[in-house]
Image (cartoon, grey):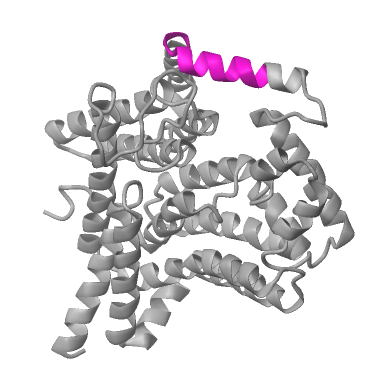
Amino acid sequence: MNSFQDRMLTLARWGVIGLLFSISFSKALFNISSTLMIAGWLLSGDFPHKLSLMRRSPVTAASIGLFLIIAISTLYSEADLQRMLISVQAYSKLLFIPIIVSLIDTPQWRYRCWNGFAAGMIVTLAHAYADIWFDMPWTRTYQTDLNGDTGVFQHHIAQTVVMAFFAAFCLHRARRSQLTGYRVLWIALSTLAALSITHLSIARTGQVALMVALLTLLMVSVPRRWVLPSLGGFVLVALLLGLSSSSLQSRFQQAYEEVTQFQFKNDYSSVGARLQMWNISLGLIREKPLLGHGAGSYTPLVEKAFADEHMCSIGCAQPHNQFLLFGVETGLLGVLAFCALLASVLVAWLQMPDRNPLLPVYVVILGLTCLSDSGLLIRAQAYFFIPVLGLLASGPICTEETVA
């Protein structure tokens, strides 16, 4: 590899760091970074080596396969050309996963990438707490009265889902670090991330994701003899968070009321609207169960089903369930391909000699989020799920000591 190719490879790797740094707060920087990553990847050459790196991880084949199924579904889609292109463009970011795997192949670059991710999360956390007292003009309005969108830069659901993973990531870094100062730093960041979800946010998805993520991290990290004491500690912490958070209590009480009072007509509540969307989606899946209606077809099909303009404003863009969205547009084949992607992350985890517990944590967060939202379609969530999966699939997380 000549000096020009070396420079392009370095440019591409810094593009990956830019992606991970900008996840939560800058769409422009994310897009610029992705352009630099792709351009550097193409110009750096050495594609046989890159392909050999891609083949090491089952995640790369699963992500490419899912995208190909989506792209092929455009051949029979019931949507117009514009909607098909929007859908394909959104899911084309799945191809970032094999690109990242082929670029981040050394412990030093993985360390830099994870630090880039952590730096972006710290920026978001700092604004989350600062916005309680100061009205910063470059952020979204931060409200703590449970009546609004409490995201700092992105939608509150996307922000809390990312923070749930970050809280688990920080605990993993603290556990792996051999230096007391670093352990204290990572534990403090994990605590702040968790509290930003339970006490500053109204997003139930993020609140549930946090609990499930921490429980998963616990189950795959601690030795067997410590499982029961650790579970007891987890239950105690969960109770303390629940009892001390009026936001968490209010949102789950609201969810219970919405379920018990649900009506199929004119129910615009968070749970009620989802149940209506899911019912319509299941009907569309039954019409074409194997291959679906094609990429981008969900919106025009549901617009015919929802005569109510307000309900359509809630549910005509996406059904708030990634599994059902794939079912409508790509049928059983697409749903199985998505499940294969989730399974491939666990396979990659089992294949690692030093199993990274963040891979199963990632799977449960992605799976949970996609049960109540379209995590790979919604830009703010896809910005997190896709590049982080590429980095997880590239190899184990390095600590400060291992790269020193």
Instruction: State which quarter of the image contains the N terminus.
Output: bottom left
Q: Residue 253 or 212: which is nearer the viewer? A: 253
Residue 72 lies in what quarter of the image?
Answer: bottom right
Is residue 224 rendered to the left or right of residue 180? right
Question: Does 98 lie within the magenta span?
Answer: no
Residue range corresponding to the magenta coloring: 242-256
Q: Main secondary structure of the magenta part?
A: helix
Question: Does 251 lie within the magenta span?
Answer: yes
Is residue 358 rendered to the left or right of residue 257? left
Query: Is residue 46 in sight in this rendering?
Result: yes
The residue under the point 31% across, 88% down is: 45
The residue under the point 27% across, 28% down is: 131
Q: Residue 308 or 4: which is nearer the viewer? A: 308
Question: Does 131 appear above or below 88?
Answer: above
Residue 40 lies in what quarter of the image?
Answer: bottom left
Q: Position of residue 236 (x, y in %)?
A: 45, 13
- Looking at this rendering, what residue extends furthest in the front direction? 309
Question: Does 254 appear above or below 67?
Answer: above
- Looking at this rendering, what residue extends furthest in the right direction? 287
Question: Does 195 appear above or below 38?
Answer: above
Q: Where is residue 35 in the image (x, y as percent from the top left)?
A: 33, 72
The residue under the point 72% across, 63% down is: 297
Query: Is residue 398 in sight in this rendering?
Result: no
Q: Position of residue 80 (x, y in %)?
A: 70, 71
The residue under the point 43% across, 18% down is: 145
Q: Looking at the image, how many numbered discs can be counted on the residues?
A: 0
Q: Where is residue 203 in the image (x, y as percent from the top left)?
A: 50, 30
- Looking at this rendering, what residue extends furthest in the bottom direction? 2
